[in-house]
Image: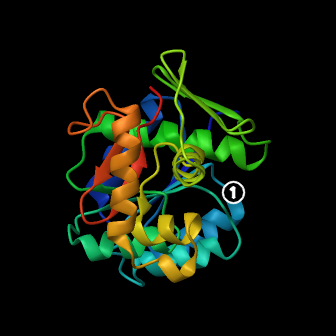
Amino acid sequence: MNHAPVILVIDDEVQIQRALYKILSERHYRVLVAATGEAGLASAAAEMPDVIILDLGLPDMDGTEVCEKLRQWTHTPIIVLSARTDQRQKVAALDRGADNYLTKPFGIDELLAHVRVALRHAAHIGNAPESVIEIGTLRIDLSWHVVTLGGTEVKLTATEFKLLAYLARNEGRVLTHRGILNEVWGMEYENQVEYLRVYMRQLRTKLEADPHRPRLLLTEPGVGYRLAARK
């Protein structure tokens, strides 16, 4: 257990604390628990966890503030776990540094999948990023700017590749509309959501078996997009 990944849970609900501790401990993760934002920040600084699971409704400060404070000094992946369903709050948490957002009540398999994705990102923080990402039959070579699907090369425009590459480097993470537009096109485009939708449709036409029922390039309604995570 000394080498087990460390997961910090910042949540003031005792039932959630107990449930997460049981679920994660049974999968051989080392679990730390904090009931307030200040305690969570202190624990994050002292223990340097591999992943942080964060509730937004804390008794001493809002979880988005905790995200901001954490992002001042650490890139540790943050999974927000909250009863809030308002899309604006989801976007605010993601824009302030969260990597993913799960709504309570949550499914155990979904939570564990998010943890696995977060651990992959945590591993990349201290190592050279992957140059090739494979998800099913989709293969994205970030170094050579080559995309193949089922072994056949797919021709993308420079902007289409830049968009796909950004999604691939953040595989499994929810990326907000504004964040994608800012990264791919620049700050002056960050409110041009329809512009982004056009390019996503083009990518889906080229990469999805059924562009109307995407399996790779997924929509997070009202929030943004994500590239499906590897299993």
Question: Residue at left 67%, top 77%?
Answer: 72
- Residue 49, relative to residue 140: is it above or below? below
- The residue carrying mark 1 is 48
Q: Is residue 140 visible?
A: no
Q: Quadrant of the N terminus?
A: top right
Q: Nearer the viewer, residue 114 or 230?
A: 230
- Return the x and y of residue 129 as percentages of the image width and height: 73, 42
Question: Residue at left 38%, top 47%?
Answer: 202
- Return the x and y of residue 164 as percentages of the image width and height: 52, 46
Q: Is residue 46 visible?
A: yes
Relative placement, left or right, of 156 versus 177 is: right
**How many numbered marks does the figure carry?**
1
Q: Nearer the viewer, residue 59 or 92?
A: 92
Residue type pointed to by label 1:
Met
Neighbor class of circle 1 (other Cα within 10 Å; few <14, some 14-19, many 20+) is some
- Return the x and y of residue 76 as percentages of the image width and height: 62, 57
Q: Nearer the viewer, residue 149 or 85?
A: 149
Q: Residue furthest top?
A: 151
Residue 145 position by quadrant? top right
- Residue 43, relative to residue 21: is it above or below? below
Residue 140 position by quadrant? top right
- Return the x and y of residue 220 as percentages of the image width and height: 29, 55
Colouring mode (rainbow / by chain / secondary structure / one colour): rainbow
- Residue 9, relative to residue 57: is it above or below? above
Q: Quadrant of the C terminus?
A: top left
SS label for mark 1: loop
Question: Residue at left 46%, top 35%?
Answer: 25
